[in-house]
Amino acid sequence: MHLEPWQRPVTYAAIGATQAKDLMEFPPAGYRPIERRVRIGHGEARFTWAWTTTMSWGIQRLSGFVVDVLDSPREVVELSYRPVSFDASGEPVEPAAVGAPAETMFGPDGMAFAAPGDTALLRIPFGPFRVTAPARVVYVLDEPDRKGFAYGTLPGHPENGEEALIVERDADDSVWLRITAFSRPANWFFWLGYPVLRLSQEFYTRRYERALTGPIS
């Protein structure tokens, strides 16, 4: 039976595990975790540009991906879980909710912000080819000084796992990008090419790290 991309479940069980404080010590069984935190600038303008660019899939597009966000039935997005957000002292700033945002928000280039339940096709350059990697937004983080989202892999992605891209602002007004992920090859074919897959992942992770350090547009 043919399923539309929005009907397909993610290909791993530990949904949301990129939020775990001990991910690097205790990743989901069989998965390789990574965590990077790189400084991308300073000040309110950099923070605002960085998180709005991130929320509109700008890191991926600035790294050479083509991103196509697919239409999903409204009820799918409306019934997606939105986690509690917290302020710097750990106090909740909004209740956990189920539902779409009251209005769609857009990034600097006019692309809509990612929302829980969104399904996207990421077309990733790989030599002379582009590998299509379907993904689903599994949570959005919207705190005063931490904003971003995580997406999980769907069938057809070369890997199984989850990746979170979070822009953070420290007390000294420095701005950072935190990349947290866990992954493993999706099937035997990609296990055969695992060394190449890891090199490719490292290559694009470094592109991610540089994507938000350029001029503010």
Image (cartoon, rainbow, N blue to C red):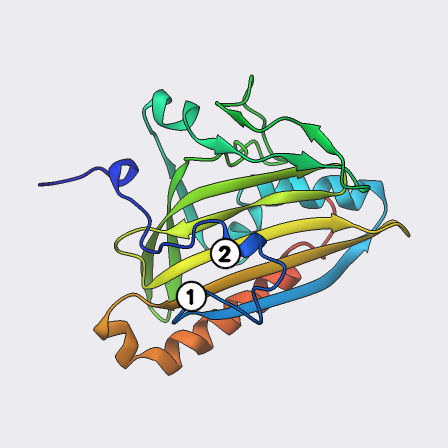
Crowding at mark 1 (Cα within 10 Å: few <14, some 14-19, many 20+)? many
Residue 163 is labelled as: 2
> In the image, residue 175 lies at what x, y percent?
78, 52
| Placement of the C terminus among the 4 image quadrants | top right
Where does residue 142 sit, x and y in percent of width and height? Answer: 65, 36
Res 161 quadrant in image: bottom left
* Amino acid type indicated by mark 1: Ser
Which residue is at the far top? 102
Residue at horizontal 29 percent and vertical 65 percent from the top? 186
Find the residue positioned furthest to the right: 172
Element type at marker 1? strand
Q: Please name the residue shown 69% across and 46% down the image.
A: 50
Quadrant of image for the N terminus: top left
| Residue 162, image quadrant | bottom left
Q: Who's the residue at 71% across and 41% down the image?
A: 49
Residue assigned mark 1? 183
Q: Horizontal and vertical percent for residue 16?
A: 49, 49
Determine whether label 1 and label 2 are within 8 Å by CB. yes
Which amino acid type is marked by label 2?
Answer: Glu
Mark 1 and mark 2 lie on one chain; the one further toward the N terminus is 2
Instruction: Tell me the residue at 43%/50% (across/down).
Output: 15
Q: Residues within 10 Å of mark 2 (few under 14, many from 20)?
A: many
Give the percent coordinates (x, y) of residue 66.
Answer: 42, 50
Looking at the image, can residue 217 be seen? no
Please state if 181 lies on the left or on the right of 197 as rendered: right
In the image, 44 versus 90, the foreground residue is 90
